[in-house]
Amino acid sequence: MTGAVSGTAHAVYEQPSVALLARGLRKAYGATVALENADISLRSGVVHALLGENGAGKSTLVRILTGAVRSDSGTITLHGQPYAPATLIEARAQGVATAFQELSLVPNLTVAQNLLLPAMPRGPLGLVSSRRVIDAGAEILVRHGLERIDPSAQVGMLPLAERQRIEIVRAIENAGQMLILDEPTAALAETDWLFERIRLTTAKGVAVLYISHRLAEVREICTEATVLRNGRSIASVGLAQASDDDIFEMMVGRRVDQQARDRAAPTASADAARVSVSSLSGHGLNDISFDLRPGEILGLAALEGQGQRGLFRMLAGLEHPDKGQIAVDGTTAQLSSPRGALKAGSGIAYLPEERKTEGILAGLSAATNIILPVMPSASTAALISQQAEQSAARPAGQKVEMSPRYLGFAIGDLSGGNQQKALVARTLATGAKTLLLYDPTRGVDVGTKQSIYAAIRAFAAGGGSVLFYSSELPEVVQLADRCMVLYGGRLFRTFEGKAIAEQTLVAAMLGHGSNEGALDR
Amino acid sequence: MSATSIEAGSNSVVRNSLVKLTKGAGLIVGIYLILYALYVYQQPRALSASAIAALINNTAPLALAAMGQTLVVVSRGFDLSVAGVISLCNVVLAVYPIGGPGGALVSMLICVAIGASVGAVNGWLVAVLRMQSIAATLATMIICQGIALVILKAPGGAVSNWIADELTDRLWKTIPVSGLVVAAVVGIWLLLRRTDFGLSLYAIGADEQAAKLSGVNTTRVRFTTFVLAGAVYGLAGLMLSAQTATGNPTSGTPLLLLSFAAVALGGTSLAGGGGGLFASVMGAATLMLLQKVLFSSGVSSFYTGMFQGMTLILAVVFSGLLTRLGERK
């Protein structure tokens, strides 16, 4: 368009200038090559998406750009100057800041202190003034439309979504040249606030690198994208020119079949309920009743903080309900612990929300992580060998299409997608007939998602019951036989079969529409 | 509706004060006061200035050792070198006494320098070479005790008279000097706590990775923590020498486990990221007072350890109960 051959110099002035240019980046950890040959070019004031499956090298590229690791070879320039940060502090000094997927907030400090780390405003005596810290923190929060967050609140006490917003705000505050957002919407149910912040940031000429598995989001906010596959950058494309299928093909290397699911009418509705919840209240819930039948995949859709967390934690035995009853296989159960929930009737297994803190045991092998709940059955005379562990873990691993060679690795060294597969495998390995899955595909790539969906469907087809919550509506639409919408702690509407569509779900999640369907049990 | 919100309001006030009580030194100060009342009831003379000074003199070495330990514990580490540093300072003061107030000042600087150097080695091993703190400080403790044995083979020697007399004396017949030393360190801590370093210390104790990603120079903070802790152990060695007036190559050993007990008794979580130095001072004071109370009750000193351990368990369980009460609803 702009005369790429004759007028290159001219074109530079017309287009936003190149902020960051990376060429031939390579990084190996021992024998594993995490990044083989990656090129990326970011322009000032433009949001650039980084796409790729888990293990494609996205995290490694981000770690190099943030100064967490150094590349083995390759060059990076930032506005023409060589850029090779040895530490995160150096990267920040050059105006590059990152909002990390696994959040980097210190739990025992306040919101204001976290926003201002590492240097606090001082009082007249040169000592940190707690009043000034809170004032400065409050000012930042107001600037980003988060007045509702108390700057003196301890970060560890805040809900995950608010922590993610604080993480993003802090990165924006520190990003003078380049902002890296790694899965910024993993814990956010709506994107309006985030996209508004991003637009204001790019308006100042900051280059933004946006990493997300949600293509719809990427299309909305990004103008161009770089696709990584197996540690190589496959292509840099303008998103307007590439279709979803094109992008999937570049990511996976083959066409992904977007299975529109054929919805068989729920076959199991005549059976007795496996889990029956009546008038359950407490922990954000208000008088919830529903049945979960054998062979059923029951979805739960809600904006963040509508009581879904409380519901799952009560069903998993982590919290006690204030009122109401939970019956498993027809008998009222007192679920006092996750172990108790596993042993109640045909068993309830829970996949928790936070993989890093509530899910994996990072130092142990993937196999150990999978068979943890069923250790006694895998052992002979209370002793257990590594081979026994791995062979016990293999069937569950196969159900989620986890490659057996990963079983021996420490789970902390695996990619997020494989960690999540292992955790799903763990809930399957318990032998429980009811699974509670809280956001089972949070922050995992397309391929892993399909494996997890297949495992869930196979489990339900075998007579298991699944209750899952997802922050991603397409997932609910694709997976659920029946879908409940929570709003304000109440069961607002229930949809069945073909009535489950994104538009109607969104309306119900926002509290619109009649709630006449709320009691169609 | 309004009635419930008022109720909720007063509930949260109660909760906040409970949280404060458990977070600060409130609980341990309360325990101390109760114990002290018991002591006074048994020994009315315990309220005299000389008795109080004797008690504080007794407490000072452990209180200082516990303060240094707290610094390391808050940063999520353990420092076993406390025993080695105290023994080493003690034998140096006993073998090379320097007389007069000037000599005392030099001696103090030597002790602080010994402690800070050992702390620097610890800091280098832990922060730079990424050794586990228990392993690194176990090694430096053994090395220091080895050096102490080389300097002084068997208990003996004499600490300079000025140190032995003046540092255990009372200013204007009321204020014990040892108490001033402890208070000075607490004062420095209160200032330090309100610096970027102080905040970073709690940050790396709670989540080192997050602190690093937040831009905290975790290596420097951890290194500095060990150096400061070592310097405070040096002061502990000085005060112990003033107390015993003689040298003993194993004089620091009894303080090793008691320093952890004092930290835990003060409510500082051994998992790091919380607690404070003053609470540990009160923890140390409680342990020492308990000895006195048991002695004055006619309980054989063989039982002291048993009672100290039980007090520790009760205090930690009780503070856990209070915390849980505070977090309810």
Image (cartoon, rainbow, N blue to C red):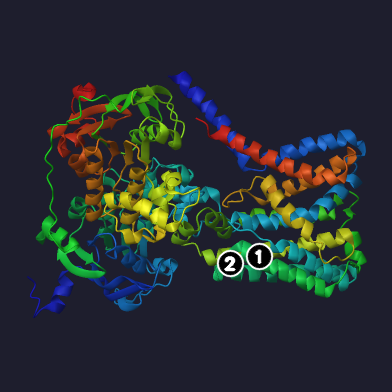
For this rendering, which residue is in front, A313 or A421?
A421
Mark 2, residue position? B126
Nearest the viewer among B33 and B127 is B127
Amino acid type, mark 2: Val
Q: Quadrant of the N terminus of chain A?
A: bottom left
- Amino acid type, mark 1: Thr
At 54% from the left and 49% from the top, the residue drawn is A130
Q: Residue furthest front?
A: A381
In the image, is residue A32 above or below residue B204? below
The C terminus of chain A sits in image quarter: top left
Identify residue for label 1: B137
- Residue at mark 2 to residue at mark 1: CA–CA distance: 9 Å
Q: Is residue A221 above or below residue B220?
A: above
A6 with respect to B62 (left or right) = left
Subunit that carries the residue with mark 2: B
Helix or strand or loop: what does disc 1 sit on?
helix
Where residue A344 is drawn, which disc sits there?
Answer: none
Residue B228, position in %: x, y? 66, 63
Residue B311 lies, with reference to residue B148, above or below; the image says: above
Count the marks.
2
What percent of the width, then of the height, locates residue B216? 49, 62
| Residue at point 89%, 40% (across, down) | B296
